[in-house]
Amino acid sequence: MAFGPGFGTGFGPGFELSEEAGVTVPDVVGDDEATAITALEGVGFVVIVQRRYSGGVVEGNVISQVPSAGQSATSGSTVYIRVSRGPAPTTTGYGFSSSIGNIGFIQ
């Protein structure tokens, strides 16, 4: 079976899942990036890392993976992991009216 971006994963190019005997995908969600990559490469997978903001997952830790833990996949196939960039940055500052007022255009 091949699943691509149309499958709703949002991970990019397809990956191969095998109905034949394959390698069981380890659970790396919650692991730090280096530990996750080592675990996945250690059983023969190619790892693609994507970074996303996440307020609920510590920066540098894995948010999600595709294929999921426990699935069987062929050795050499790709496992995609999303790694937290930490919380999304917030913008603060003056609104347009306040900014104009601060430079003397509005009294």
Image (cartoon, rainbow, N blue to C red):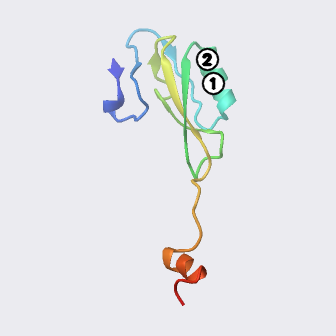
Indicate left or right for 30 with 65 as reference: right
Q: Residue at x 63, y 28 (%)?
A: 36
Location of residue 104 by image quarter: bottom right
Pointer 1: what residue? 37
Please state the total of marks drawn on the protein image.
Answer: 2
Neighbourhood count class around disc 2 (C-alpha, 10 Å): few under 14, some 14–19, many 20 upward? some
Neighbourhood count class around disc 1 (C-alpha, 10 Å): few under 14, some 14–19, many 20 upward? many
In this orientation, which residue lies closer to the viewer: 84 or 73?
84
User: Where is residue 94 shown, x and y percent of the image?
Assistant: 57, 74
User: Where is residue 69 shown, x and y percent of the image?
Assistant: 51, 28
Q: Residue at x 64, y 15 (%)?
A: 42
The answer to whether the residues at label 1 and label 2 have Cβ atoms under 8 Å apart is: yes
Indicate left or right for 96 with 56 as reference: left
> Distance between the Cα atoms at labels 1 and 2?
6 Å
Q: Could you say whether the residue bearing mark 2 is in a helix, strand or loop?
A: helix
Pointer 2: what residue? 41
Q: Could you say whether the residue bearing mark 1 is in a helix, strand or loop?
A: helix
- Say what amino acid the circle numbered 1 marks: Ile
Query: In the displayed structure, would residue 42 be above or below residue 35?
Result: above
**Residue furthest to the bottom:** 107
